Amino acid sequence: MSLKNKAAKLDFSNLPGLGPDTEVPARPKTAPGAMMAFANEARSDLLRQNEELQQRAQQSQALQGRLDEALSELRQWDGAKAARLIDAALIRPSRWANRHELNYASPQFDKLKTEVADAGGNVQPIKVRPVAEPAGSFEVVYGHRRLEACRQLGLPVLCLVDSIEDRALFVEMERENRGRKDLSAWEQGMMYRRALDAGLFPSLRQLAAAIGAQPGNVSTALQIASLPDAVVQAFASPLELQFRWVAPLKAALERDEAGVLERARELAAQSPRPAAREVLARLAGSPGEKSALTRQTRYTLGGKLVGSFDKDAQGNVALRFKAGALTADKEKRLLELLAKFFD
């Protein structure tokens, strides 16, 4: 068979894209037609490329939007510092620490310690700053009670670490404690006195301005911290001293300092020491005068003081009970008993 006849018998219909239903575009037979076909193909390519570019632009805009949202969220945390757990043994109290050790033997501290134990640690971080010696150790900025609770429980302490200078440390600690409203007048006064004695602030007014407090309040706190040691020790705890007691105590000391100090030493030697109000009355009274208030009887319930019978120098009597000390039935019976003494 000739080559021509063999070629005629070849079947190209099974080749890909050349089946019986495949339409093969006709090729233009003239030069203008070929140019027109080329232009159409080029236009189609350009349209397709334009669509792809638009899709990419939309995707880019969407990505940019998500990026902007992420950056905005990050800006909200600008300057924030991550909290981390630190061994309590590596943290020392601040040199400006204002917490008296009696704070750690109070019902309020016991409650805090229970909360820390139940949570497995201090949920609210304390703030510390790194110190040079010993290496790897820290100093408290604020959070001494939370640190002590973790220390007693043998737990690591959740901390915010920040490198700040002395004055900034003092201001942050003072404001944080004053914001909690659980710092006693005497503790505040001692804190202010340490800062001024160390030259942290050149004057009382500048100290007051730095912490955002009234100069008069700072002055009163300093006067409490400046009371003679014998007067402070006359009270069962210095935490009992109150701002409004400064004036009568100062007046008594100016009038008869020797007499006040003698009475203070006598009170300090008593065991147990009288209640704070009685100590104040005996210290602030004039020489030879009877105490303005004499505590006659105390009433306890479950080992806790719940009431008192008071009689002053003029014979006035006051009977006081703490809220909840009397049940409704006991209160009724007490009123019935008192009614028998009067018309």
Image (cartoon, rainbow, N blue to C red):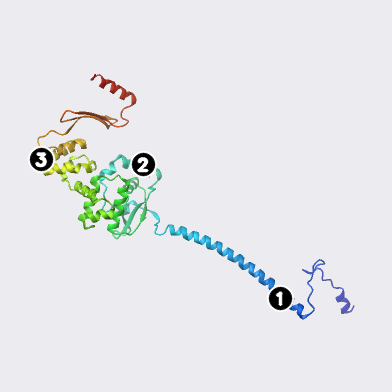
Residue 106 visible (yes or no): yes
In this image, 62 relative to 132: left or right? right
The quadrant in which residue 53 appears is: bottom right
Secondary element at image label 2: helix
- The Cα atoms of the two marked residues, 1 and 2, are separated by 84 Å
Q: Which mark is residue 39?
A: 1
Vertical arrangement, residue 303 with respect to residue 216, above or below: above
Residue at image x 61%, y 65%? 55
Going by the numbered disc 3, the residue's amino acid type is Gly
Task: Look at the numbered disc 3 and give the secondary structure of its residue.
Answer: helix
Q: Compare marks 1 and 2 and give the one earlier in the sequence.
A: 1
Taking the view exactly as shown, the residue that stands out farthest to the bottom is 31
Q: Residues within 10 Å of mark 2 (few under 14, many from 20)?
A: some
Q: Which residue is mark 2?
A: 114
Left or right: where does residue 166 sit relative to residue 85? left
* Kind of residue sitting beneath label 2: Thr
- Give the residue drawn at x 31%, y 25%: 331
Q: Which residue is mark 3?
A: 259
Q: Nearer the viewer, mark 3 or mark 1?
A: 1
User: Residue 266 location, x and y as percent?
Assistant: 13, 38
Q: Earlier in the sequence, mark 3 or mark 2?
A: 2
Q: CA distance from mark 3 to mark 1?
A: 117 Å
